[in-house]
């Protein structure tokens, strides 16, 4: 009889604890979800000027407000940050910037470190399998970067590189990788985690040609006199590179609610005008710490 009573008490106690744990867990989840409704958590490299960069001051030279990087003493600014702030303001949310390596930017979002990516990401067919995208918040052109005074400084069209044996480079994990194959007879050197490493390869003569977007190239050329930016003739340039032209905001594949919420904010502030986008980009280019 005593044994039966003890067993009954243990079972009852276990059920009570399970019930409390369950209720507590629900409370935590609800609290977290509520908090996330008030905070726009954004992932970006904070190392991809002029789209995003890291600085040690809270403002830029023209007085624009930078955003403190989550769990850091540094701040982030750039085109991505400026657009993210516009959207957060429109949504009545606080902006939270998370700094992350480009190679793990999607993995970190999927794991819940942040909820969207605003990081100069091109919307490609391959990426659409894994993420949900807004319409473009920027339209960019692709270009090549070569060394000043080098044998490729006066190139005007892509075909001029064919058969030269030039060494190509670009950033890892980007839509520029497939474009390397469009230069016949070229050699592919090392591709790098960041665009700054790509430009360094040009400066150090370990690569001859870097394939990248125009704003990033222009940003680098502001502080590196060894670089020459070449916008190729429209009749002799890359083909099938439209995917890298459309720069969009990404959310987790199943988080269409947030995607639609962000899209609604973009529509509300009219962020679909290329002229307006280019104007902001031109302003941001002058605000980089290394450009002043």
Image: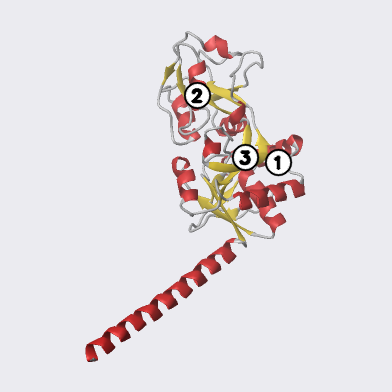
Q: Position of residue 227 (x, y in %)?
A: 54, 25
* The furthest residue to the bottom: 2
Q: Along the horizontal axis of the image, is 116 left or right of 274?
A: left
Residue 54: x, y in percent? 53, 47
Give coordinates of residue 44: x percent, y percent.
53, 46
Residue receiving disc 2: 178
Which numbered dot is residue 280?
1
Q: Residue at x 43, y 32 (%)?
A: 192
Label 2 SS: helix
Query: Sequence order check: which comes first, mark 2 or mark 1?
Result: 2
Residue corresponding to mark 3: 248
Q: Residues within 10 Å of mark 1 (few under 14, many from 20)?
A: some
Left or right: where 272 falls relative to 109: right
SS for tag 3? strand
For image coordinates 72% across by 55% down, the residue present is 90
Give the secondary structure at mark 1.
helix
Q: Quadrant of the C terminus?
A: top right
**Viewport quadrant of the N terminus:** bottom left
Structural distance between the alpha carbons of marks 2 and 1: 29 Å
Tell us which disc is closer to us: 1 or 3. 3
């Amino acid at each position: 009889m005593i044994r039966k009573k003890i067993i009954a008490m243990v079972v009852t106690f276990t059920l009570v604890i399970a019930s409390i744990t369950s209720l507590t867990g629900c409370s935590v989840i609800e609290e977290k979800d509520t908090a996330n409704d008030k905070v726009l958590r954004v992932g970006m490299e904070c190392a991809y000027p002029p789209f995003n960069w890291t600085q040690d001051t809270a403002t830029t030279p023209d007085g624009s407000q930078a955003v403190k990087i989550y769990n850091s003493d540094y701040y982030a600014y750039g085109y991505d940050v400026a657009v993210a702030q516009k959207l957060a303001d429109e949504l009545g949310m606080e902006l939270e910037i998370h700094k992350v390596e480009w190679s793990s930017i999607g993995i970190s979002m999927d794991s819940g470190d942040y909820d969207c990516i605003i990081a100069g990401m091109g919307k490609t067919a391959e990426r659409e399998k894994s993420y949900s995208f807004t319409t473009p918040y920027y339209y960019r052109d692709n270009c090549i970067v070569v060394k000043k005074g080098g044998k490729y400084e006066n190139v005007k069209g892509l075909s001029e590189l064919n058969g030269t044996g030039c060494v190509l480079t670009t950033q890892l994990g980007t839509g520029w990788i497939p474009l390397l194959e469009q230069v016949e007879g070229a050699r592919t050197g090392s591709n790098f985690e960041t665009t700054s490493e790509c430009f360094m390869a040009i400066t150090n003569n370990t690569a001859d040609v870097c394939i990248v977007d125009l704003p990033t190239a222009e940003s680098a050329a502001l502080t590196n006199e060894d670089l020459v930016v070449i916008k190729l003739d429209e009749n002799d340039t890359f083909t099938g590179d439209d995917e890298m032209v459309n720069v969009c905001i990404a959310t987790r594949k199943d988080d269409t609610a947030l995607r639609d919420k962000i899209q609604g904010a973009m529509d509300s502030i009219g962020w679909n005008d290329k002229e307006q986008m280019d104007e902001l980009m031109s302003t941001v280019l002058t605000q980089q710490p290394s450009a002043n």
